């Protein structure tokens, strides 16, 4: 079952001023992004190209990432850093040099420019370690997972933000990332994606933000209105209390996102902010759009959104929800081209494309995902079911242990509503057949609400003990076709109690 986040903002709130109709004109932008390049507002202000044209290096530790930055000829020399493995406090130290300004316990992109960080191979996980972008420009972050970054407790990193930007940041594209926590402020976590103190021209695309009290903010206070020109598209926000995002001043374009289980509030446009909210899908949520927790109103232009089982509070001293029948109270002109998926398609499109280790799949704007050919990127397959029959259906199963109320058979029943969970944080679950069966792909699906719980794992040929593949996190696993009669998914590390809803196997 989903872990409820008991998070409430403890502030005295004044009455909300009714928003007036205001027209907005944005600067003319020259868009020259390639098919696999930046999108949205990150294409403005000269564009966002990251480390294109520079050296490409590989890093498996945080220290190696810092060393790559510090080894450049200057702080603006383009560089692409391909990251694989788990980056944590134990392998992230400060490195000194004339082209960098780093610190231990955080990936520090400070006073630098022209950098791409991209997860490759088996994937990149920043575990309890945040990415801090400060006084920087032209930064790209793609295909990485950042999880459980804390501002209190132990260990702490990056003020509790998974990705945080501040102090004259320009042109950042964050794409196909997974940002997740395990609770709210009371549990030591803060925002997943925060921008403040003059951060502009940013795009967050095809990403997952989940299991947090706070999705993210634009502007740290009602007076911090120097941020803006932010695009959010094709992202999944799931099991979040509020701030999806919180927008203080500035302009945001929010389209084709999927929102599920927003507990307190969603898009919070306030302090004069203006948001264009197009073709999003909101489900099983509360107060998904409006001005909340302030007397300084914000504005929105809405169109094409779907509100599925959304509840709305009555207007009061501490909120001004846009619903139950959201209407536009401003107009916002968007100065770049973009294609809209119909809102009814959004949940499925986002499920197939968003997050790390999905093969950098994107939508073509016609409700059909398509796969680009990136210059650098992961070799993992997307998580939708591969072609062919799921060989686990009708097979047998066993395991090393199970928690009360779970069954080994739950991982092969084709239902996401049942699951197997080990008695502790580690354990084995196996699929077995009466005769040798050729398998080359497995899909591990976590039970709804427990996504991100599975950490390190091995996929093992139980007959020979050979490790077929190892990695971190649930999803699709491909390996050399192997004839076997029993295959084991061995969880060697997890956050909380891992829950495997389905262990699918395929011949190809």
Image (spheres, grey):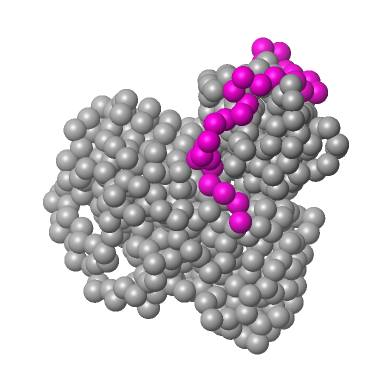
**Spot occupied by residue 289 in the image (x, y as percentages of width and height):** 30, 40
**Spot occupied by residue 163 in the image (x, y as percentages of width and height):** 55, 56
The one nearer the camera, 239 or 442, is 442
The one nearer the camera, 459 or 326, is 459
Question: Which residue range is magenta in the image?
Answer: 379-406
From the viewer's perspective, tell me whether residue 84 is left or right of residue 51: right
**Dominant secondary structure (helix, strand or loop) of the stretch shown in magenta:** loop
Q: Quadrant of residue 507?
A: top right
In the displayed image of the protein, which residue is found farthest to the bottom? 73
**Residue at 52%, 77% in the rendered image:** 52
**Residue at 69%, 78% in the rendered image:** 70
Q: Is residue 20 above or below residue 80?
A: above
In magenta stretch: residue 403: yes
Residue 42 in view here = no
From the viewer's perspective, tell me whether residue 459 is left or right of residue 308: right
From the viewer's perspective, tell me whether residue 403 is left or right of residue 7: right
**Spot occupied by residue 158 in the image (x, y as percentages of width and height):** 62, 56
> Quarter of the image containing the N terminus?
top right
In the displayed image of the protein, which residue is found farthest to the top? 405
**Spot occupied by residue 457 in the image (x, y as percentages of width and height):** 74, 40
**Residue at 67%, 53% in the rendered image:** 122
The one nearer the camera, 181 or 308, is 308
Number of disc labels: 0
Residue 204 in view here = yes
From the viewer's perspective, tell me whether residue 157 is left or right of residue 268: right
**Residue at 41%, 60% in the rendered image:** 203
> Quarter of the image containing the C terminus?
top right
In the displayed image of the protein, which residue is found farthest to the right? 464
In magenta stretch: residue 103: no
């Amino acid at each position: 079952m989903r872990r409820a986040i008991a998070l409430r903002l403890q502030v005295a709130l004044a009455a909300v001023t009714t928003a007036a109709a205001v027209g907005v004109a944005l600067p003319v932008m020259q868009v020259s992004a390639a098919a696999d390049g930046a999108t949205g507002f990150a294409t403005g202000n000269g564009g966002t190209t990251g480390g294109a044209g520079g050296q490409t290096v590989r890093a498996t530790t945080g220290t190696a990432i810092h060393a790559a930055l510090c080894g450049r000829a200057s702080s603006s020399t383009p560089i692409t850093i391909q990251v694989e493995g788990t980056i944590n406090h134990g392998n992230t130290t400060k490195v000194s040099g004339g082209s960098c300004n780093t610190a231990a316990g955080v990936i520090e992109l400070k006073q630098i420019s022209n950098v791409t960080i991209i997860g490759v191979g088996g994937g990149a996980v920043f575990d309890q370690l945040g990415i801090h972008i400060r006084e920087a420009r032209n930064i790209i972050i793609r295909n990485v997972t950042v999880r459980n970054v804390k501002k209190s407790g132990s260990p702490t990193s990056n003020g509790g933000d998974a990705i945080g930007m501040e102090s004259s940041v320009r042109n950042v594209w964050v794409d196909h990332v997974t940002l997740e926590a395990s609770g709210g402020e009371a549990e030591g976590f803060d925002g997943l994606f925060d921008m403040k103190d003059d951060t502009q021209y940013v795009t967050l695309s095809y990403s997952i933000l989940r299991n947090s009290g706070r999705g993210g903010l634009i502007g740290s206070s009602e007076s911090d209105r120097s941020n803006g020109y932010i695009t959010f598209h094709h992202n999944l926000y799931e099991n979040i209390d509020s701030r999806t995002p919180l927008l203080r001043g500035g302009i945001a374009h929010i389209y084709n996102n999927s929102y599920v289980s927003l507990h307190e509030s969603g898009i919070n446009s306030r302090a004069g902010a203006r948001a264009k909210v197009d073709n999003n899908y909101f489900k099983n949520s509360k107060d998904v759009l409006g001005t909340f927790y302030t007397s300084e109103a914000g504005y929105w232009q809405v169109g094409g959104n779907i509100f599925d089982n959304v509840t709305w509070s009555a207007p009061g001293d501490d909120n001004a929800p846009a619903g139950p029948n959201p209407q536009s109270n401003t107009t916002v002109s968007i100065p770049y081209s973009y294609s809209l998926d119909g809102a009814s398609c959004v949940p499925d499109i986002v499920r197939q494309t968003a997050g790390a280790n999905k093969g950098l799949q994107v939508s073509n704007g016609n409700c059909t995902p398509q796969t680009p050919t990136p210059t650098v990127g992961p070799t993992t397959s997307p998580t939708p079911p591969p072609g062919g029959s799921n060989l686990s259906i009708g097979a047998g199963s066993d395991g090393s242990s199970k928690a009360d109320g779970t069954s080994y058979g739950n991982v092969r029943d084709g239902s996401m509503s049942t699951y197997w969970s080990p008695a502790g944080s580690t354990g084995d679950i196996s699929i077995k057949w009466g005769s040798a069966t050729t398998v080359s792909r497995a899909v591990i699906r976590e039970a709804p609400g427990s996504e991100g719980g599975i950490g390190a794992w091995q996929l093992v040929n139980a007959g020979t003990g050979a490790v077929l593949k190892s990695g971190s996190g649930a999803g699709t696993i491909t390996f050399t076709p192997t004839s076997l009669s029993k295959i084991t998914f061995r969880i060697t590390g997890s956050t909380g109690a891992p829950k495997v809803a389905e262990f699918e196997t395929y011949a190809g």
